[in-house]
Image: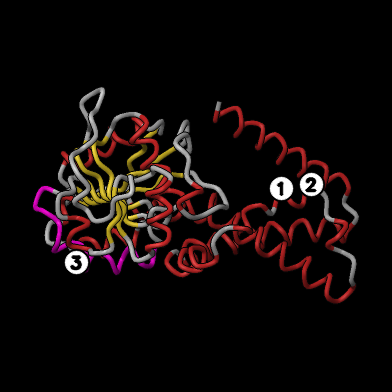
Amino acid sequence: MNRSGADCGPPRKQVAEPLFETMTVVGVGLIGGSLARAARERGLVSKIVGLGRGEKNLRKALDLGVIDCMETDWAKGVRDAELVVLATPVESIVELFAKIGPLCGEETILTDVGSVKGPIVEAAERALPSPGRFVGGHPVAGTEHSGAEAGFASLFMERTTILTPTERTDPEPLERLRALWEAVGSRVVVMGAERHDRIMGFVSHLPHIVAYTLVHTIYTEDEREGEVAKFSAGGFLDFTRIASSHPEMWRDICLMNRGALLEAVEAFARTLDGFKAMISAGDGKGLEEHFDRCRRTRAALLEGKK
């Protein structure tokens, strides 16, 4: 396993017929590394190449057995790839199309795992020589951890992966990517990029903003009053766990999905104003009814996921 460069020897012997001979992962972090681990564990690919700028992280991925070989040269990294997975922060995915697109083979399938789809899909169709071979993707899964060591093969089990093809997408890449994500345990949903971004603005991006805001509120009050944060219990830490996520990643997500996210933030602010009004008015009955409705809604969501 101590090999570097995309010429890392013959593919590993597979128990079953793989979906892809060679998969190149650009950005071997939590999502890219987990997909590599899951694909290897299930025999879905014969060879996995890790490609990126950070040699230290790639070396760690190589030592951990996440990838078969590492490469920092773009041309060598994608030269023989049947599938290239872009798993970098969303802003850099847009930039990568111009670098990697012309270097890929005509039959290479290109996809990404970013949680914003509209700007990425638009950039792919502008920049790629063969935009029909690109399929936007987003596995709705993750943790607050990052780096090659953060990945694990079961991350996508019983999770949803959203694919966002366009009218220009070739059917064959779409179906092969559907097969890949289903094989690693995901339920695959196909929808337009705009719809994806609005939904994620509410159910994924807004919760992160709320968690970061709550941590900042407590920090500010602690500086003013003192000894507030030290009384935070398990509930506070559980609720704000996602505020430990990578700052660069969430900066890019906020800026790239700003329209949908602003809509979600404004809806949340209206709801918070409603709570504030009931508390101010001493409306115990209204508060109880609201809490009960929220409790029943969450119970229904959990039941639906089962």
User: Which residue is labeled 1 in the image?
Assistant: 238
Dividing the picture into quarters, in which one does residue 229 lie?
bottom right
**Nearest the camera: 142 or 61?**
61
Q: Earlier in the sequence, mark 3 or mark 2?
A: 3
Where is residue 65 shown, x and y percent of the image?
Answer: 39, 42
User: Which residue is labeled 3 in the image?
Assistant: 127
Where is residue 41 shown, x and y percent of the image?
Answer: 37, 31
Kind of residue indicated by mark 2:
Gly
**Nearest the camera: 202 or 293?**
202
Q: Nearer the viewer, mark 3 or mark 2?
A: 2
Query: Callout 3: helix, strand or loop?
Result: helix
Query: In the image, which residues are magenta?
Result: 90-107
Image point 75% across, 67% down: which residue?
A: 217
Is 110 situated above or below 187? below
Dividing the picture into quarters, in which one does residue 300 lie?
top right
Q: Which mark is residue 142?
A: none
| Side of 210 where 172 appears, left or right | left
Image point 45% across, 55% down: which residue?
A: 198
Kind of residue indicated by mark 1:
Asp
Q: Earlier in the sequence, mark 3 or mark 1?
A: 3
- Quadrant containing the C terminus is top right
User: Which residue is labeled 2 in the image?
Assistant: 234
Image point 15% across, 57% down: which residue?
A: 104
Q: Nearer the viewer, mark 3 or mark 1?
A: 1
User: Mainly helix, strand or loop, the magenta region?
Assistant: helix
Where is residue 9 shown, x and y percent of the image?
Answer: 19, 44
